[in-house]
Amino acid sequence: MSAYNLNTVERTTFDPVPANIYRLRIRLLSGGVGLEGLLQLAKNLRTEMLVVEYEILHDESGDREYEGRKIRDWITLSANVDNDGVLAPIDGKTANGFRRAVEMGWGKLRDII
């Protein structure tokens, strides 16, 4: 394996996008599972998420300083909380957390639409 000197690598930074009202382009990224293959299976193997990519077009004044910046969001829309022997068992607190994530996910999706 070759040695790499990270001190010679040019730094790239992205300042956070400031709070403002932005016009966005929204794209759904297919995950291959769930409804019409639109959802992505989480690493926990129990929740399915809609992956949404927001691309900034301009702010409310038409300023395009952040044009092209992309932000991704993973919105949980379903959860398998059954202890059916297929997956490792989960406790009630974890199951309730998954249920709450689903409620919040559907609320967020409603707000986007």
Image (cartoon, grey):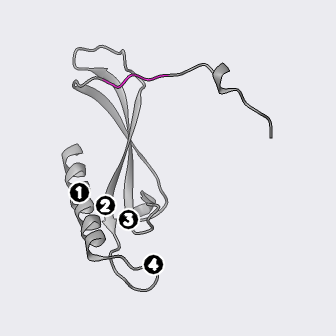
Closest to the observer: 34 or 99? 99
Earlier residue among tags 3 and 4: 3
Of tags 3 and 2, the one toward the viewer is 3
Relative to residue 47, is residue 104 depicted above or below?
above
Looking at the rendered image, the quarter that the N terminus falls into is: top right
> To which quarter of the image does residue 113 belong?
top left
Q: Which mark is residue 87?
A: 4
**Residue beneath disc 2:** 77
What span is colored magenta in the figure? 13-17
**Residue beneath disc 3:** 47
**Rendered residue at 41%/32% (across/down):** 70
Of tags 2 and 4, the one toward the viewer is 4
> Is 37 displayed left or right of 104 in the figure?
right
Residue 55: x %, y % from top left? 38, 31
Q: CA distance from mark 3 to mark 2?
A: 8 Å
Q: Which mark is residue 106?
A: 1
Q: CA distance from mark 2 to mark 4?
A: 19 Å
Earlier residue among tags 1 and 4: 4
